[in-house]
Amino acid sequence: MRKNGKYRFSLQFPAETEEQIQAGELLERLGNRKSAVVVAALWEYLLANPALLSPECRVEIKAVQNVSSEQLKEMVRKMLDERLMDANYKGNLGKVTAEGDNNITEMLNNMDIFGQIQRNCGRFNV
C-alpha cells in the first residue's frame, strides 16, 4: 500500500525449505534495513526480466516445494516407522511386515526417482 510517498507491505512465508530458511534468516538479521535489500533484489530481477515492468504483463508464479531426496526419504521412513509401531501396538506386526517388507524395500530403493522429478520441475514461471 502506498501512503504519504512510502510503500508498506507485510511479508510472511513458511520455514520449510533451506531456501526459505536462508531468506528468512537474512531478513531477520537485517532488522530495519530489509527494505534496501528487497528493493535492490527486486530491481536486479526486474532488469533481468523487463517484461514485468509492462502494465500489460500478467504475472503467474507457480512455486514447487523444494524437498531434497534425503528429506523425502526421511519423511517416508518416519511414516513407515509410525505404521510399524501402530501395527506392533495392534498385535499384527508380523502380518504388516511380511506383506510390506518387499514393497517398502522397493520403494526406498526407488526414492531417487522422486529426487529426479523434483530437480526437473521448474521453480517459478513468470
Image (spheres, rainbow, N blue to C red):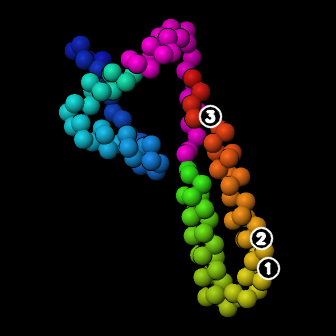
- Give the extent of the magenta segment: 43-66
Q: Is residue 109 above or below residue 87?
A: above
Q: Is residue 12 left or right of residue 104?
A: left
- Where does label 2 land, which residue? 103
| Number of other residues with Cα within 10 Å of mark 3, as a class: few under 14, some 14 to 19, many 20 or more | few
Residue 48: x, y in percent?
48, 16
| Foreground residue among 59 and 81 | 81
Residue 46 position by quadrant: top left
Q: CA distance from mark 1 to mark 2?
A: 8 Å
Q: CA distance from mark 2 to mark 3?
A: 30 Å
Residue 85 position by quadrant: bottom right
Is residue 103 in sight in this rendering?
yes
Q: CA distance from mark 1 to mark 3?
A: 37 Å
Is residue 14 in sight in this rendering?
no
- Where does label 3 land, which residue? 122
SS label for mark 2: helix
Q: Is residue 82 magenta?
A: no
Q: Is residue 53 magenta?
A: yes
The disc placed on residue 99 is 1
Label 2 near label 1: C-beta < 8 Å?
yes
| Number of other residues with Cα within 10 Å of mark 2, as a class: few under 14, some 14 to 19, many 20 or more | few
At 22% from the left and 15% from the top, the residue drawn is: 4
